[in-house]
Amino acid sequence: MAHKKGQGSTQNGRDSNPQFRGIKLYGGQVAQSGSIIVRQCGTKFHPGHLVRMGKDNTLYAVANGTVKFRGRYVDLIPSDEGVEAFAAAGSAVN
């Protein structure tokens, strides 16, 4: 009888790389055009004014401005004068 185990492969030992999800820019912080605001799995947050969603549900800014969270929606208050402002019901744009 053998006293050593055979050198078989194990079923463990695999690990995936981290996805680094979460909120990258919080409310009141300044976002540049193209900067990522939220990396998410599914649609916990939805794009609002001047925010678009990528194919992996990442929310990113399409203009320069200040991030504003409105419930489950993420808006961008533009800092440029040429971009139209957004006035949602019940939200004060300063």
Image (tube, grey):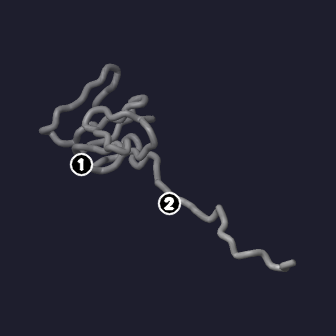
* 16 to the left or right of 60: right
Q: Secondary structure at mark 2?
A: loop
Q: Which of the labelled discs sits on residue 89, or is there none?
A: none
Q: Residue at x 68, y 71 (%)?
A: 8
Q: Looking at numbered disc 1 in the image, what kind of residue is underneath it?
A: Ser
Q: Residues within 10 Å of mark 1 (few under 14, many from 20)?
A: some
Q: Residue at x 46, y 47 (%)?
A: 22
Of all residues, the one furthest to the right in this rendering is 1
Q: Secondary structure at mark 1?
A: loop
Q: Which residue is mark 1?
A: 33
Judge by depth and name the residue closer to the eye, 54 or 13: 13
Above or below — where is 72 with respect to 57? above
Q: Looking at numbered disc 2 in the image, what kind of residue is underneath it?
A: Asn
Of all residues, the one furthest to the front in this rendering is 1
Q: Which residue is mark 2?
A: 17
Q: Residue at x 30, y 47 (%)?
A: 31
**Which percent across, then down, holds residue 43?**
42, 35
Answer with the quarter of the image where residue 46 lies.
top left
Mark 1 or 2, which is nearer the eye?
A: 2
Of all residues, the one furthest to the top in this rendering is 89
Answer with the quarter of the image where residue 12 lies.
bottom right
Q: Quadrant of the C terminus?
A: top left
Earlier residue among tags 1 and 2: 2
* 16 to the left or right of 35: right
Q: Kindly report the distance in space between the C-alpha atoms of the residues bearing marks 1 and 2.
A: 28 Å
Q: Residue at x 34, y 49 (%)?
A: 36
Q: Quadrant of the N terminus?
A: bottom right
**Which percent across, then down, holds residue 20?**
47, 54
**Which percent across, then down, holds residue 3?**
85, 79
